[in-house]
Image (tube, rainbow, N blue to C red):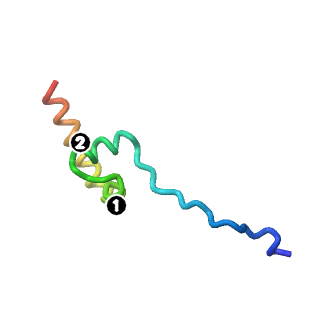
């Protein structure tokens, strides 16, 4: 009876979402979205802050 409720198709694996802002920051630093998703959180934070400082200096 339990086999009746079993899913027959393989389920879609959700990829780690990368926001559009993070895609821009990753491209600015030369990373692909896949490589960006593998970076540790502190490294991502530092890269985001470096872009923010560059934008402040440019304005």
Q: As drawn, is 21 to the left or to the right of 3? A: left
- Judging depth in this view, the residue of 54 and 29 nearest the camera is 29
User: Would you say 24 lies left or right of 53 here?
Assistant: right
Quadrant holding the N terminus: bottom right
Disc 1 versus disc 2: nearer the observer: 1
Q: Relative to 15, is 25 above or below?
A: above
Mark drawn on residue 38: 1
Q: How many marks?
A: 2
Say which residue appears at 36% left-offset and 57% top-offset: 34
Residue drawn where x is 28% and y is 48% of the image: 26
Q: Residue at 18% of width from left, 36% of height from top?
A: 53
Which percent across, then down, holds residue 59? 16, 24
Q: Is residue 52 above or below residue 46?
A: above
Q: Position of residue 38 (x, y in %)?
A: 34, 61
* Depicted 13 relative to depicted 29: above or below: below
Which of the two discs, 1 and 2, labels the residue nearer the N terminus? Answer: 1
How far apart, in angstroms, are the residues tagged by discs 1 and 2? Answer: 18 Å
Residue 57 percent coordinates (x, y): 13, 30
Check disc 1 and report its element: helix, strand or loop. Answer: helix
Dividing the picture into quadrants, the one containing residue 54 is top left
Name the residue tied to disc 2: 49
The one of 19 and 44 positioned closer to us in this rendering? 19
């Amino acid at each position: 009876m339990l086999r009746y409720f079993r899913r027959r198709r393989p389920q879609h694996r959700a990829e780690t979402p990368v926001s559009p802002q993070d895609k821009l920051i990753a491209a600015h630093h030369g990373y692909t979205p896949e490589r960006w998703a593998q970076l540790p959180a502190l490294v991502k934070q530092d890269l985001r802050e470096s872009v923010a400082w560059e934008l402040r200096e440019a304005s």
